[in-house]
Image (cartoon, rainbow, N blue to C red):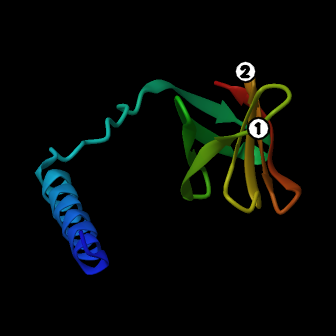
């Protein structure tokens, strides 16, 4: 067999394999990613110093907060050595909860203090 013919055969095989791979890939069934349903664990009302309040709805991986100054926010769970800690991405707002107590830190200042479950 001549050298030129070998290269043509190799090229044809590569093209056929490439087309076959494209056809096979396009015929695969699309996969759907399973999404875990959001589980609400509990809702708690905290009363704090200075007549402030926090309504906290705890989920498996986040907390929804309604603060008595009419702010509403969702904070994802963050790493904590003790208790439950939730924080926004730059950690300018942090909600801590341990047992029946909680507090909110904003820009390293405690803005909702001595909060106790109602």
Q: Position of residue 17 (x, y in %)?
A: 22, 59
Residue furthest top as drawn: 99
Q: Determine which residue is flagged by label 2.
A: 100
Which residue lies at the image location 67% right of the left edge and 56% below the top edge? 88
Which residue lies at the image location 74% right of the left edge and 62% below the top edge? 90
Disc nearest the viewer among 1 and 2 = 1
> In the image, is 87 to the left or to the right of 10?
right
Q: In which quarter of the image is residue 3?
A: bottom left
Q: Determine which residue is flagged by label 1.
A: 79
> In the image, is 4 to the left or to the right of 73?
left
Q: Position of residue 82 (x, y in %)?
A: 84, 25
Question: Dividing the image into 4 quarters, which one contains the N terminus?
Answer: bottom left
Examine the rendered structure and indicate whether residue 57 appears above or below residue 25.
above
Residue furthest front as drawn: 1
Q: Position of residue 73 (x, y in %)?
A: 55, 54
Viewer-proximal residue, 5 or 23?
5
Q: Where is residue 78 in the image (x, y as percent from the top left)?
A: 71, 41
| Number of marks | 2
How far apart, in angstroms, are the residues tagged by discs 1 and 2? 19 Å
Q: Residues within 10 Å of mark 2 (few under 14, many from 20)?
A: few
Examine the rendered structure and indicate whether residue 16 appears above or below residue 103.
below
Q: Earlier in the sequence, mark 1 or mark 2?
A: 1
Which residue lies at the image location 35% right of the left edge and 31% below the top edge? 37
Residue 98: assigned label: none
Q: Is mark 1 on a helix, strand or loop?
A: loop
Q: How crowded is mark 1: few (under 14 residues within 10 Å), some or many (20 or more)?
A: few
Q: What element carries label 2?
A: loop
Question: Dividing the image into 4 quarters, which one contains the C terminus?
Answer: top right
Q: Quadrant of residue 117?
A: top right
């Amino acid at each position: 067999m001549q050298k030129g013919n070998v290269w043509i055969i190799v090229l044809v095989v590569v093209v056929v394999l490439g087309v076959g791979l494209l056809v096979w890939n396009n015929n695969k069934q699309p996969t759907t990613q399973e999404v875990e349903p959001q589980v609400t664990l509990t809702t708690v009302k905290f009363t704090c110093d200075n007549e402030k309040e926090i309504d906290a709805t705890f989920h498996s991986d986040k907390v929804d907060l309604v603060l008595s100054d009419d702010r509403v926010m969702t904070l994802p769970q963050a790493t904590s050595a003790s208790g439950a800690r939730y924080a926004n991405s730059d950690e300018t707002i942090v909600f801590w909860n341990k047992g029946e107590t909680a507090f909110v830190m904003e820009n390293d200042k405690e803005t909702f203090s001595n909060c106790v479950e109602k």
